[in-house]
Image: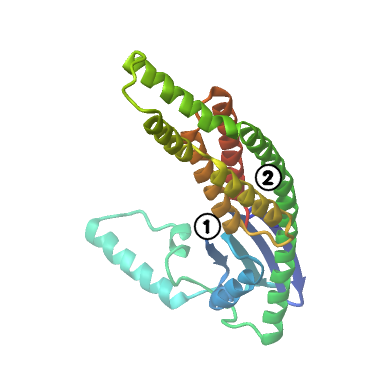
Amino acid sequence: MKSMTGYSSLASRRAGLNLLIEIKAVNNRYFRGTLRTSPLLARYDQELEAILREDIARGSVTLFMELTQAGEVARASLNEAVLASYLKQFRGLGKKYRIADPPSWEGLLALPGVVEEKISPQLALKDWEWVAGELRRALKLLVAMREKEGGNLRKVLLGHLEDFAAAVKEIEKRAPLVSKTHVDRLVERLNQMTAGAAIFSRDELGKEAALLAERSDITEELHRLVSHAGQCRDTLRDRGGNGRKLDFLVQEMMREINTIGAKVADAESSRHVVAAKLEIEKMREQIQNIE
């Protein structure tokens, strides 16, 4: 099981090349990659994202990669023709609008095309293979962190699941009382309404009581709850894990416990229903960060 949160970085070099890699990952329902690369790697965006997808199924991933050539700064040069063109235009504008102050060198060097960087537009195959290998190495570091975090999440979720199961067990113990409580209340209300007069026959009253007992029965909901909780436990113990499956299961668990909450009538059962809901909410919050 992996968390969707993680971070890794590494710096590496080989003859003539320096490489810096940084990967950040946070939770997202789907995979979303954001790549920030230096000019030498601009044409490899598709290949870089494909490598990320090898080990990351879900999450927002930001990849920063800077690849520079040794002595790259020293190889930058001025384009004198472009600079001369700018200066000519500045002088003309200065005379026209009577501007005496000349442009600064800082401003001139920042103009497009004045400074040219002589960088190879394409990497040699062996250099690209080295870059790809280093990215996979950084990715392994990220995955290791996500797995460690995922292990911690598994323990937390199993703890919440045990507390949830304990609350459900208490509800199960009181399940036989749920229908009886509803029937007793029905009889009490009818007695109050009729003031003891025999308005309803025993058969009619028996049918109404049986129908009410059937409607208030929570046996099926409890069976489904136990089944969902068991699947949830098995999924958590599975080494691979599955955040989407867990998300679905806790949604179903919440649906069933809501139905039970609408049926139970005694305060003690309602208290255990609230406790079970609280554990489901805690699980749902943590599951959002599982890949």
Q: Tell me where residue 239 sits by quadrant.
A: bottom right
Q: Which residue is mark 1?
A: 29
Label drawn at residue 150: none
Q: Is residue 76 visible?
A: no
Q: Which residue is mark 2?
A: 157
- Which residue is painted at 62% across and 69% down in the image? 52
User: Marks 2 and 1, Cα distance to the nearest angstrom?
Assistant: 19 Å
Crowd tier of the residue under label 1, counting other residues whose Cα lies within 10 Å: few below 14, some 14–19, many 20 or above: some
- Asked if 91 appears above or below 77 in the picture, the reply is above
Spot occupied by residue 112 in the image (x, y as percentages of width and height) = 42, 69
- Asked if 149 appears above or below 276 in the picture, the reply is below
- Which residue is painted at 32% across and 17% down in the image? 194
Quadrant the N terminus occupies: bottom right
Q: Marks 1 and 2: in contact by CB < 8 Å?
A: no
Spot occupied by residue 58 in the image (x, y as percentages of width and height) = 58, 61
Q: Amino acid at mark 1?
A: Arg
Residue placed furthest toward the bottom = 125
Residue placed furthest toward the left = 96
N-terminal-most mark, 2 or 1: 1
Q: Is residue 258 toward the left or the right of residue 280 in the image?
A: left
Q: Secondary structure at mark 1?
A: loop
As rendered, which of 240 and 169 lies closer to the eye? Answer: 169
Q: Tell me where residue 119 sits by quadrant.
A: bottom right
Q: Tell me where residue 139 sits by quadrant.
A: bottom right
Quadrant the C terminus occupies: bottom right
- Which residue is painted at 44% across and 59% down in the image? 107
Q: Secondary structure at mark 2?
A: helix
As rendered, which of 120 and 185 lies closer to the eye? Answer: 185
